[in-house]
């Protein structure tokens, strides 16, 4: 990917490339995939683990819904082509907003 430009995560952690290296060390594993894992799977592992932990802790399904929304955003961003990325992001945001609306409406009525 053009934004990242480094082959390994260690190259960002030595801060010798630019002042954006700390930001790129967080962003690039999710956009390029880290340690040979596709970015969608990596984000599902990270966000899913955090979401499941928070869901269990607070006894509410909202964190796991947010985790799936973040994973869907990563999947939409990794689609080939600029126009498809924008279209996928817009559709995904619409579906997420509708799902959250329906979830909150159902919670109020039950």
Image (tube, helix red, strand yellow):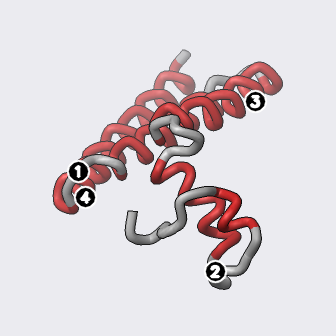
Mark closer to the chain start, 1 or 3:
3
Mark closer to the chain start, 4 or 2:
2
Say which of marks 3 and 4 sits in front. Answer: 4
| Secondary element at tag 4 | helix
As drawn, 89 above or below 16: above
**Where is mark 2, residue-wise?**
17
Residue closest to the eye, 34 or 87: 34
Left or right relative to 33: residue 20: right
| Label at residue 54 | 3
Q: Bin the neighbour count of mark 3 within 10 Å (Cα to Cα): few under 14, some 14-19, many 20 and up.
A: some
Q: Which residue does the image show at 62% across and 36% down from the upper left?
A: 47
State the CA–CA distance, disc 3 to disc 4: 30 Å
Mark closer to the chain start, 2 or 3:
2
Is mark 2 in CB contact (under 8 Å) with mark 3?
A: no
The count of marks equals 4
Is mark 1 in CB contact (under 8 Å) with mark 2?
A: no
Residue 62 seen from this side: no
The x, y position of residue 56, in whole percent, is 77, 19
Say which of marks 2 and 3 sits in front. Answer: 2
State the CA–CA distance, disc 4 to disc 2: 30 Å
**Where is mark 1, residue-wise?**
80
Q: Which residue does the image show at 33% across and 46% down from the upper left?
A: 76
Say which of marks 4 and 2 sits in front. Answer: 2
**Where is mark 4, residue-wise?**
86
């Amino acid at each position: 990917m053009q934004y990242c430009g480094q082959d390994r995560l260690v190259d960002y952690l030595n801060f010798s490339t630019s002042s954006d290296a700390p930001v790129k060390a967080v962003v690039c594993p999710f956009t390029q995939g880290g340690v040979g894992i596709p970015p969608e799977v990596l984000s599902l592992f990270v966000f899913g683990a955090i979401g499941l932990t928070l869901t269990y802790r607070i006894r509410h399904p909202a964190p796991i819904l947010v985790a799936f929304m973040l994973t869907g955003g990563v999947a939409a961003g990794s689609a080939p082509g600029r126009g498809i990325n924008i279209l996928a992001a817009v559709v995904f945001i619409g579906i997420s907003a509708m799902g959250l609306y329906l979830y909150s409406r159902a919670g109020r009525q039950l």
